[in-house]
Image (cartoon, grey):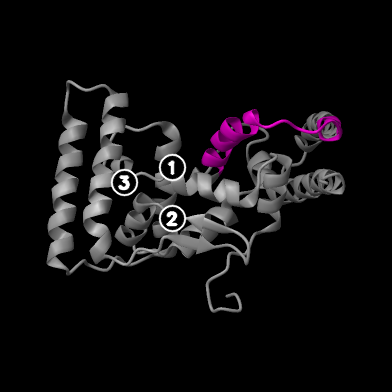
Amino acid sequence: MDSKGRDQLALTEDFRVACTISNLKHEEVLQYFINRVSFYAFNGGEMEAVSLWATSIIVDCKKETGAVVEAVTDKKVQRISLKYILLLGDLNDNPYLSTIDKMKESIVLMKEWETNIAPIVNYPVSFQLDEYRSLVLTFDFNLLCRMNGVTPFQILQYFVSKISLARERALNLLEFVETNSCMSLFGMMKLSLTAKKNKIPIHLEIHKWYAEKLNLLDERLKEEINLEKRILVYRTFYTEWYNALRKNIN
């Protein structure tokens, strides 16, 4: 917790490394995740892949933490929620609308739901990262946190703890084995956000140099059968890459 008694995220070294190498800010990554969480997707609606992955992170967090969902007892909240759950279900079942039209209409319905329920629920509107930075918590994000028995802090900490370039590369070096919802979202995020940014020349040189070294490292580590040893070597390599970028960050 911080000096004001608020839950404070522990940003892991792997998370910091992944963000810096991907040319992304910590708050930028976390806000992107929050913004893509969708109740419509959670309710079975057709959505873009990035929203499906973001939403599945909350479900995965609930399973891993064994969270217990508290029943909603307020009759008005129950009535309003049931109305919009049914409307969203009908929308998804509508055979005459395209997926894009359904997505657009779902956003309108979620806004209506938020407007009607906001005065009678105590959903937090923000999450403080530190003294200077905060995240905006969307209605969809808050709603799914409550429905899965987890807090925004738990979800965000879970997400941060699952981001690791070293583990992802070591695990899938010989053949694709698996990924997790957090790394899948992070991969899509890099494609979406990093492509819009201009790297400074020195960073381009650093990235080129380390990308070439990474390919050579891949070949060497294919002979290493111990997963944890591969992770350790990759982690050391990515940390060196991270430090090289940090030296030229300003």
Mark 3 is surrounded, within 10 Å at the Cα level, by few (under 14), some (14 to 19) or many (20 or more) other residues, namely many
| Mark 1 or mark 2: whose residue is earlier in sequence | 1
Q: Is 69 rendered above or below residue 6?
A: above
On the picture, is 242 further left or further right than 63? right
Name the secondary structure under disc 2. Answer: loop
Q: CA distance from mark 1 to mark 2?
A: 11 Å
- Can you give x and y, in whole percent of width and height, for residue 157 in the image? 54, 60
Mark 1, residue position: 36
Q: Image point 54% across, 79% down: which residue?
A: 5
Q: Nearer the viewer, mark 1 or mark 2?
A: 2
Q: Image point 19% across, 33% down: which residue?
A: 91
Identify which amino acid the numbered label 2 is placed on: Leu
- Can you give x and y, in whole percent of width and height, for residue 20 in the image? 72, 45
Q: Is 9 rendered above or below residue 144?
A: below
Query: Contact, CB < 8 Å: mark 3 with mark 1?
Result: no
Identify which amino acid the numbered label 1 is placed on: Arg
Mark on residue 137? 2
- Can you give x and y, in whole percent of width and height, for residue 4 in the image? 56, 78
Identify which amino acid the numbered label 3 is placed on: Phe
Taking depth in this image into account, of 240 and 74 the one nearest to the observer is 74
Name the secondary structure under disc 3. Answer: helix
